[in-house]
Every structure is written in structure tokens, then in C-alpha cells.
Image (spheres, rainbow, N blue to C red):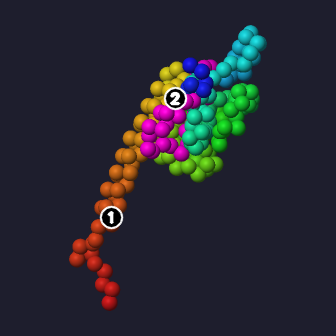
Amino acid sequence: MGEEKVKEEAMQIIGMFQVVPRLVVFDLDYTLWPFYWYPLFFISECRSKREMPSLYPHAKGILHALKDKGIDVAVASRSPSPDIANTFLEKLNIKSMFVAKEIFSSWSHKTDHFQRIHSRTGVPFNSMLFFDDEDRNIDAVSKMGVTGILVGNGVNLGALRQGLTKFSQNWNTSQKNKQKWISKFSQKPDSSEKIDQK
């Protein structure tokens, strides 16, 4: 399926949801592209194939669909080679699409990455959707309020649909809980709690 067809289908999927994230964050390795970014791998792969490795087949179409629908995108990667990762993003002509690129090695399971993304964008964690290939990263940022989706073979249209569905469910649950809280604390106080305003 070509990039334009993927973009068209992705836009249809996004259009099915009343509530969408303000920001969609992607891991790089085994999420947007099918390899890990280690310098020796990069050098041997590129020299042997004489070409740059590419994104997963649906990745670029999904990125363009999100941008066209007014949804910002960002990167959170624990790559030990941020310079190479940034060069590759540039060569793929997608580097400028991202409102934030947090690419650095860390033992924090990406919580530091998301703190920086939040500081940079001002987007609340519960308004973010995250795709990653490691469940430990998904678990860690989910505790922050981010909706996380584990991808097996890179981001694709199925993962996008799953992510938007889960985001919508999480959003609806948080809104119901918010309404319960507001109702509970905005009820009129009973006579014993009334303040004397004489």
C-alpha cells in the first residue's frame, strides 16, 4: 500500500473519533523504523546496502495524516546515537514534522523524555498518545497519564486504530471521574456545615 493510500486510510480512522490526542509521540527503533540505531550497525548496514534504511511501510503516511488533522507529533527515543537518529530523520524529510524530539540514552524508561516533551509543548500527559515497542516504556509513561500502545512490527494502521480507541476510552473514563469529583465537592453543604455570614 502506497504512502498516499495509507495517509488517506489513516485520516479516515482519525475522523471516526470525536476525541483525539493533542500530541502523538513515537519511539524510533522498531516503532518508526525496523532497526536499532547503534553506530556500528548503521555503518555496516548502509555500506553493505549502499542506501539508507527506511521507515516501516505505514509510518510516513500516518505521520502526514496526523499533521493534516492538526495533531502534533513528537519523538521519544532512548537511542545512544542521537546525532545519527537526527540525521536519518532529516534524510527522510520528516525531522521538521516533530514539535519535540527527545532523543537521548536514559535508564528512566522514557519518563524523563515525557517530562521534557511536556515542558516543551505544554500538552498535558493525558492528552498524549505514545507508540513504543517496549512494554516497560509503555508501563512507565502510562503511570504519568499517557495512553501507551505496544507495537509488535512497527506502527501501522491497526496500531493507530487501537491507539485512538484506547485514548478515547481513557479520556472518557477520566472525564466521568472528573464529573463525579465535581459533583461530590460542589454539592451544597448541609446545615451543620453552613458558615455563619452575619
Vertical side of 157 occupied by 103: above or below: below
Near-viewer residue (63 or 197): 63
Q: Position of residue 69 (x, y in %)?
A: 56, 41
Q: Residue at x 44, y 37 (%)?
A: 16
Q: Which residue occupies 54% across, 23% down?
A: 154
What residue type is disc 1 on? Answer: Phe
Q: How far is the residue under mark 1 from the one under mark 2?
A: 44 Å
The residue segment tinted magenta is 7-35
At horizontal 70% and vertical 38% (from top left) the residue drawn is 96
Instruction: From the viewer's perspective, tell me whether residue 45 is left or right of residue 77.
Output: right
Does the segment drawn in magenta span residue 28? yes
Question: Do labels 1 and 2 touch, CB within 8 Å?
Answer: no
Regarding residue 134, the answer to whether it shows in the image is no
Circle 2 is placed at which residue position?
Answer: 9
**91 left or right, relative to 176:** right
Q: Is residue 89 left or right of residue 26?
A: right
Taking the image as shown, residue 69 lies to the left or right of residue 147, namely right
Of the two numbered discs 1 and 2 on the same chain, state the one appearing first in sequence.
Answer: 2
Dividing the picture into quadrants, the one containing residue 86 is: top right
Front label number (1 vs 2): 2
User: Element at badge 2?
Assistant: helix
Percent position of residue 70, x then y: 58, 43
